[in-house]
Each structure stands twice: as C-alpha cells, then as structure tokens.
Amino acid sequence: MRVAVVGAGSIGLAVAWRAAQAGAEVVVHDPEPGSGASRVAAGMIAPVTESHYGEAALTPFMAASADAWPAFARELEAASGLPVGFRDIPTVVVGVEDGDRAEVERQTELYRLTAREVETLTGRAVRRTEPLLSHRVRAGVLAAEDRAVDPRAVHDALLAAADRAGVRLEPTAVDDLDAVDADRVVIAAGCGSARFGLPVRPVRGVVLRLRAAPEQPVPRTTVRGYVKGGSVYIVTREHGEVVIGATSDERGFDSTTGTAGAVHDLLRRAIELVPETAEYHLAEVSVGFRPGTPDNLPLIGRLDPRTLAATGHYRNGIALVPATATAVAALLAGGDPGPVAAFAPQRFTEQEET
Amino acid sequence: MRVAVVGAGSIGLAVAWRAAQAGAEVVVHDPEPGSGASRVAAGMIAPVTESHYGEAALTPFMAASADAWPAFARELEAASGLPVGFRDIPTVVVGVEDGDRAEVERQTELYRLTAREVETLTGRAVRRTEPLLSHRVRAGVLAAEDRAVDPRAVHDALLAAADRAGVRLEPTAVDDLDAVDADRVVIAAGCGSARFGLPVRPVRGVVLRLRAAPEQPVPRTTVRGYVKGGSVYIVTREHGEVVIGATSDERGFDSTTGTAGAVHDLLRRAIELVPETAEYHLAEVSVGFRPGTPDNLPLIGRLDPRTLAATGHYRNGIALVPATATAVAALLAGGDPGPVAAFAPQRFTEQEET
C-alpha cells in the first residue's frame, strides 16, 4: 500500500513512521517540516492537568497516549539514535492569591475525573516537592504522572526514525489531494488542514524558552499555576532549558501583534510562582498556532475510503502523538483504532445535516 | 599626520571622520565594528533628562553636544548619503504612583540646573502632549529639547562617511598600542579600553526593540518615567520601531544571566506608562555594556604626547558623539578642545598619587 501523509509535523511523521513499520510505502509531503506547532509546543504529557471543561471525550485517549509515551519514547530513541528528552518528573499546580487558589480547587475537581493520581498538598508539602516555588504559594496539587518530553527533540527523532524506516520526504506543498499519487492519504497538516475543508483554525500561543546557567537552580517539577486570573506553565528540561507558556488568542496567523504584552504576562506569572525564573536568560520567544477545532477535540478518522484525517490536536498534539499514530496505523490496516469515535472528522458536517 | 583610532563604535568613527576631514591619514582598528554599545543604545540626546546627581561637570559638554546634533546629523546624512533618524520630538517624564511622582519632582530640580527648557505639566496637559500615556499618569515634566536619533542608522552613516572621507578600516584587534604604526593613537574602544589600563568597566543594560504595525498608534514623544521605583524610557522612531530601555547592573560581560527578569521589568514599566506598548511586537532583546568610569564622566584627553582617550561615555555615548569628535579633532590639531577639562583620562591616577 502506498500512503501519502500531508504534513511533517510530529503527528504526520509519527503516522508515517508507524505506517512504514507496517509495511506501507510512505511519502510525507511538507515544504517546511516542523514549521508548525510541533517545534513551538512545550511538550507536556498531561492527561490530568490538561483536563478542560467540555473535553471529557478526550480523557480516555489522553490517558492511552500518556501511558504509551514511555515505551514510545524508548522505541523512538532506539529507532532514531536520538534522545527525545522524556522526563519522568511530576507536575504541581499552584495558585498564589485567593482567587487563584480557588481556581486550582475548581481544576482539581476536573483532575479527579480522570481517575489518575491527584494529590492535594499543603503549602509546606508543595514547596518541599518544588523548592523553587515562591513562599507565597500556600497550597497546591500534585499530578505525579503528568510528565514532559522535548518536542523539538521528538521532531528531530521522528524525522530520523521515519527516514530510517524508508519514509520519503517530499518537500512540496499539497493543495489538491486528488493529485497525490497514493492509495491512502492522511491529512496531518495542523492549521494547514483548513485548506482541505477541515474545520481547523489557528489559536495563537506565545511560548518562551529560557536558559539557566549550569550553576543556577532549576525547578525539579513541571510547575503550573494561576496568577491573578491568568495561567502559566513552566517546563524544565535537562541541560537548563526552561519553557514558559502559553498565551492563547485568536488573530488568524498574525505572529507579531501583541507579543510584547504576551511576553510580559508570561514572565510576570512565571516570576510570581518561581521567582528564580527572573534570573535566567530569555533565549527565545516563539509564536505558534494550535490547530483548534469547533469542540476542541481532534479530527482523527476516515473522510472517505481513500482519505484520513489526523489533525486538529489543539493544545495536545505532542501528548497525543503515540495514540494518534497507533489509531491511524490501525485505520490504514483496517483494524480497530481505539477510543477515537468522538473524533470523527465529519462530526460537524453530519450534525448540520441532521 | 597618521592617526590610528582603536574602536569602530560611533565615538571612534566620528573621531576618525573628523580627523580625516582635517587632513589626517586615518586607520580605524576594530575586528567587529559596532559590536559594542553603539548599536544597543536607544539614542536619546537628552541633556535635561539625562542629568544625574554628581555629574554636574557633564552639563556644559552635554549641552554643547546636544546643540551640535541637528547640524551634525545633517552633515553626516549629506556626507554618507544615509538617514540617521534624528527626530525633533520632545521628551515627557512621568510617574504614576505617589512615590514615582515624588521622584519626578526630585529629578525636575536637577533638570532645572541645566538652565534648559523644562516645563511642569498637569495630568491633562501631559496627556494632551502624549495621548498614549496611561490615564493613571496625573502629572509630568516636558523637556522640549531632549531629542533622539537612531544609533544604528548613525553607526551605519558614520561607517559610510568615514569611508568616503578616506578612513581605512582595519579589521584586527589592537592589544599593544606601541605596535600601532601611527603618529597619534586615539583609544575609543568603549568597554574594551580597559585593556589599555583605562578605568572603564562594563555596566550592563538590556534594551528592547518593539515594532508597531502601521495601523497601530505610537507615542509622539519620548516617554520617560518611574514605575514603582524603577525607571524606563520609550523612544519611538519613524517606521514603527519603539525602543524600551534600559536596565542597569554590573555582572562583568555576562550577557545572559537575568535577562528574563530584565525583559519583564522593562515591559511592565512601559506598559504601565503607555498601555499600547503591550500591543506591539517584541522584535529584539539586546544586551549592551556601557563603558562606565569611577565618576561616571567620560575619559577625553591626552594620555601621553602620542596617545589620546575618547572613551568611557557610560550612558551618553550617542549624545556625546558630536562634541567628543570636535574635542578630539581639536586635541589632534593642537587646538582648544572645549569644556573637557573634567574628563582628563588620568584624573584618577593623579588623585591617588597626591
């Protein structure tokens, strides 16, 4: 079977890699691999703390993907010969002011619906877990199984693993799926999927990459929190990279307007929670576009006998890489794709026709 | 006469240009022209609002240089064929909270010592002068003659004008002045002047360059102010560049530690004074090193019959370009250098020997 994948982000490459492993002849089309959300993302694998109201249909898929990540990371590292920066460190969620701590409590109710490990901690206990937290943090929640990976390392490794598995990268854009010479076509073009009629829109996010000097202390957990009504996360990698994210707004593909305010807001919140972040180097400001859908759930499934969608992953693209690749590989092979019924890509069209 | 200038920052190039105009054969030595403070500076020409306690000896020299700038800019543009972005727009100085407005009042007393135009304004009047000021600004000071120039454009123009005047650029570093084949040597190496035994130390500053889209409103004055005890300035250029500066700390030549906190502080203060700045694009974070001296005054004058200093300009290098070039040209020609007696480069050594 000849499979064409449109989009060489992490979803597209993982799908291509899995399809090639299953024996398909795979071509990935992308004029600029990794130019989408894959290399902006912070890389949290957070089935608990990425729970959001109205997105309960995502819970089992997020759980399956998070549980698949450790083995997926090992397999990808072995296949590519490259590290992917998977870190088995927990996540704490904290608030400083009363309103923020109330927000943490509301979120905790959601977290518990995942039936995964969630522990409420006193201020002293949360600061023992994460000594760099501000002394103003007086309570928190520990999500021991919310982990993180380095999305740029993952993307590099997927490029290498796909290449080693025989996947061919075709550096051209696809605008007409009918013109693609393949038995199956998988649309994995993130925000670019809109040009194939899929209901995907760009949700802008600004992400900062800070760098700690070797002698500077860095967080030993992923820190998430609420500061004066705004949210922030701080993801620390090995070798001193500290990622702070993320704003969320919708201005089409505008990657410049308002980034000054976004950088300010992210730094302010991060410094309030972890004052040490002020001492790091602001190494990079990146602007990405999450592929959002009308119900915030991804588009995974068959569009017609030849065409599949694997896109619209919104905030959770990196977390959902393993489960999405497995589901699409199953669909290509005619097998059971797992818990993706809620993600049928034509669900919006069909509802309108009812 | 053969003149060697060590350092191709704006001071060194202006000195070289003037010396070549006076008939000297000039070589400027710099492995990386413009790699110092010249291209980080915001470019304020602010004899009033750059007044600082204990620096009264600078007042007449700053005044002379500021008054020389308009003609210098015209001459430099004509000689180079390049624009230098000189803008004849006023400066307002404002505070928001009580303590900050008290600081503005204290500064205003200093400003008045310059005997230049200084006008205290009501909140309404200052917001009429600068409509983008926050409604929280309730009083301010107008320095109608504090202007600004684009330091990168100035540096480009000086490179071109010096070249057209026959100055030769030698892209190598000078470590041993005795090895330089010239009748006169001018040390204009900014922070790099320390290697010749001059008492210059790096005072770090972080400066942000924001970009406003064509449809976004931008300040029509230079805005300076105090916010919760910290200072900030906002310098707007033609074509939508908005420069926000500057922090000040001393960590040697460390250009990374703490830049995250510096960016946060500058953005916070700028947004408090001019909320619209949050809507711009953060295009660049640059870190520079002001060449500071023990008394914050420059080092301009003769070190020995062959060697002159034109360095240590601390915060005021760009503002002092015309007057410094004129003074050094006069010294090279054996004439009167003007009001530079307080800047004798050996003043610290001599005091110790007394």
Image (spheres, coloured by chain):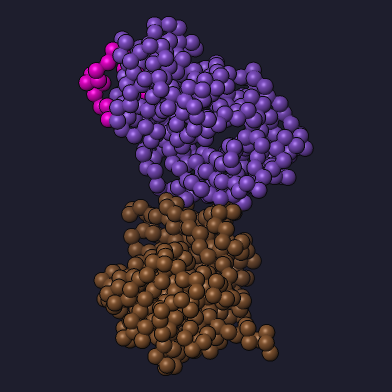
Chain colours: A purple, B brown
Image quadrant holding the N terminus of chain B, namely: bottom left
Instruction: Name the residue: 41% across, 79% down.
Output: B181
Let me know if residue B50 appears in the view: no
The image shows residue A172, relative to residue A138, as above or below, that is above
- Between A51 and A29, which is closer to the camera in this rendering? A29
Between A25 and A188, the residue placed more toward the observer is A25
| Drawn side of residue B213 relative to residue A130, left or right | left
Inspect the magenta stretch and tell me whether residue A188 lies in it. yes
Q: Is residue A125 above or below residue B309?
A: above
* Vertical arrangement, residue B251 with respect to residue B303, above or below: above
What's the residue at 56%, 50% (across, down)? Answer: A281
Which residue corresponds to the image point at 58% horizontal and 84% vertical from the top-left?
A: B346
Q: Is residue A174 visible?
A: yes
Extreme-front residue of the structure: B179
Q: Position of residue A238 (x, y in %)?
A: 59, 37
Q: Position of residue A255 (x, y in %)?
A: 39, 43
- Residue B137, position as x, y percentages in the image: 53, 63
Of all residues shown, which one is farthest toward the bottom? B335
Q: Main secondary structure of the magenta part?
A: loop
Left or right of residue B136, residue B284 in this image: left
Q: Quadrant of the C terminus of chain B?
A: bottom right
In the rendered picture of this protein, how many numbered marks are placed on residues?
Answer: 0
Q: Quadrant of residue A175?
A: top left
Q: Nearer the viewer, residue A89 or B200?
A: B200
| Magenta stretch contains residue A302 | no
- Tell me the magenta residue range: A172-189
Q: Is residue A136 left or right of residue B288?
A: right
